[in-house]
Image (tube, grey):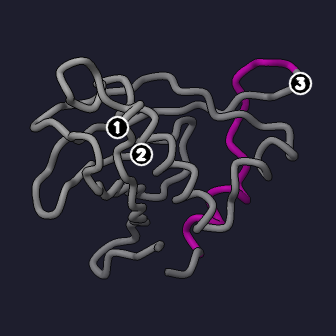
Amino acid sequence: MLMHDENALLLRNEVPYRVRYADTDQMGYMYNGHYLRLFEIGRTELLRQAGVPYSQLEEQGLLLPVLEAHVRYRAPAFYDDVLTIVTTYQPHYGATLRLEYTICRSDAVLAEGYTIHSFVSKEHRRAVRPPEWFFERLSKSEP
């Protein structure tokens, strides 16, 4: 579900995720690397809900590789936990795209972080200017 913050244009999306047995390590915790996969789930769902599915970006000849990723772990997730992936984005026209994430179990924050992406030409594999239509759609998306 896509929401707008009432005080400022802020896109926010929440997606549920149940921890699978394959997500856990030998200690029974969700493996730390899987949090980045949850970030990807949140990112693609936020873009889809905002009217810019990743498949459409690829059709337009664009890719959004990750330039930087950061995760701060606060508490572990365990098998069968139901988590909420909260993804936020403050629309602004710039050379990079920064998305913020919070992974929660009920009211407990388990992890938080961000990813930074650049726009790359699928054909030439070089950085390109972000298309204005991308930011226009995000700034005009309905909750």
Question: What residue is disc 3 on?
Answer: 123
In the image, residue 134 lies in the stretch drawn in magenta: yes
Mark identifier at residue 99: 2
Mark identifier at residue 143: none
Q: Viewer-proximal residue, 32 or 102?
A: 32
Q: Which residues are magenta?
A: 124-140
Mark 1, Cα crowd under 10 Å, few <14 / some 14-19 / many 20+, is some
Task: Name the residue type under label 1.
Answer: Tyr
- Identify which residue is drawn at 54% across, 43% down: 94
Task: Name the residue type under label 3.
Answer: Glu
Kind of element beneath mark 3: loop
In the image, residue 76 lies in the stretch drawn in magenta: no
Among numbered discs 2 and 1, the one appearing first in the sequence? 2
Among numbered discs 3 and 2, the one appearing first in the sequence? 2
Quarter of the rendering containing residue 107? bottom left
Left or right, residue 56 beside residue 80: right
Mark 2, Cα crowd under 10 Å, few <14 / some 14-19 / many 20+, is many
Task: Name the residue type under label 2.
Answer: Leu
Q: Position of residue 25 (x, y in %)?
A: 28, 21
Question: What residue is disc 1 on?
Answer: 114
- Identify which residue is drawn at 15% across, 36% down: 76
Q: Position of residue 9 (x, y in %)?
A: 40, 71
Kind of element beneath mark 1: strand
- Label 3, label 1: how far apart the Cα atoms are: 27 Å
- Identify which residue is drawn at 55% across, 51% down: 93
Q: Position of residue 19 (x, y in %)?
A: 34, 45
Asked whether the residues under the numbered discs 2 and 1 touch, taking CB atoms below 8 Å apart as contact, a structural biologist would say yes
- Label 3, label 2: how far apart the Cα atoms are: 25 Å
Asked whether the residues under the numbered discs 3 and 1 touch, taking CB atoms below 8 Å apart as contact, a structural biologist would say no
Asked whether the residues under the numbered discs 3 and 2 touch, taking CB atoms below 8 Å apart as contact, a structural biologist would say no
Q: Viewer-proximal residue, 47 or 31?
A: 31
Q: Viewer-proximal residue, 103 or 141?
A: 103
